[in-house]
Image (spheres, rainbow, N blue to C red):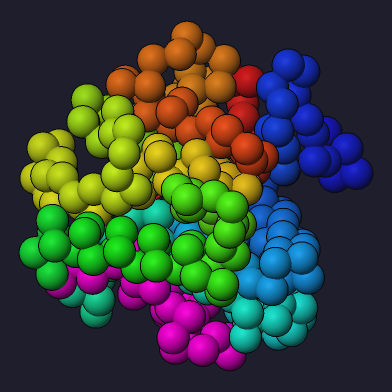
Amino acid sequence: MAESEYPRSLQGLKGVEVYPDAVSLARAAVEHFVALAAEAISTRGRFAVALAGGSTPRATYRLLAADEFAARVDWRHVHVFWGDERCVPPDHPDSNYRMARQTLLDAVPLPADNVHRIQGEMEPTRAAAQYERTLRAFFSSSAGGRDAGNEETPARFDLVLLGMGGDGHTASLFPGTMAIGEQTRWVVAHHVEKLSAWRVTLTPVAINAAANVTFLVSGAGKAERLQQVLAGPYRPDVLPAQIVRPGRGRLRWLVDAAAAALL
Ligand code: 6PG
């Protein structure tokens, strides 16, 4: 397809935007971030974003840190959170916080108090409880956009960025784990058998309360799973990315042509 025919939308797959390659996907993701940040800051005075981990978003974060884009975000009013974290110290090579700091946060004028990391160095269940307290305090405060009339303030992120693993997991909601069915807590810690590792993750309760949830999926290796997630039967226990259905928010999939090859 000619470059001009992108982004391609797909018949019957609402919210899916296909870009020719990983570079144009990253650029589209940056423009999306910048636009949502401007809208949130102008209407609510803040932009609360939960970053995705893994490797796909690295290109987006690096591009967002470049002057031409970073200058278009009013970082004073941005609050950065994470969708999940590995249970490792913040300077560990596996840390999602470390990856975001290296690719984005160290390059933009974001106030230190606006960085709300998951304390991966802490005992996992304590780290999850601590992060949930942080979220509940933020979203019930004026900064978080307290909805005065609403007792049970939801975790209303302006944007949750997510990736999708080759097994259909997202955040650290892995196939066959109890976290997929969590109905109350916003954050849980669990030992993921297939990784032999502990993870702290937002639950579907918090993810699906967001105003915008955007997946970034790239590469031929994700094509089969993406087709199953988007066009196959609904079975979130096997394909946890399917549990993401924001009740009062917009769901988008920004994908490249290689990942969309079977759609
Ligand atoms: C993590 C992520 C995880 C990631 C997927 C996709 O901590 O690893 O939160 O959900 O988004 O595994 O990872 P890639 O982008 O590396 O394929």
Query: Is-magenta flag for residue 159?
Result: no
Quadrant into which the C terminus falls: top right
Using the rendered view, name the quadrant where residue 190 is placed.
top left
The one of 160 and 133 positioned closer to us in this rendering: 133
The one of 189 and 96 positioned closer to us in this rendering: 189
* Range of residues picked out in magenta: 96-121
**Residue at image x 57%, y 15%?**
231
Query: Is-magenta flag for residue 104?
Result: yes
| Rendered view: 105 above or below 121 | below
In the picture, measured across the screen, residue 164 lies left or right of residue 32, that is: left
| Rendered view: 263 above or below 19 | above
Q: Is residue 75 visible?
A: yes
The image position of residue 61, as x and y in percent, is: 55, 68
Using the rendered view, name the quadrant where residue 136 is placed.
bottom left
**Residue at image x 13%, y 69%?**
122
Using the rendered view, name the quadrant where residue 100 is placed.
bottom left
Q: Is residue 23 visible?
A: no
The one of 155 and 66 positioned closer to us in this rendering: 155
The one of 157 and 70 positioned closer to us in this rendering: 157
Quadrant into which the N terminus falls: top right
Marks counted in the figure total: 0
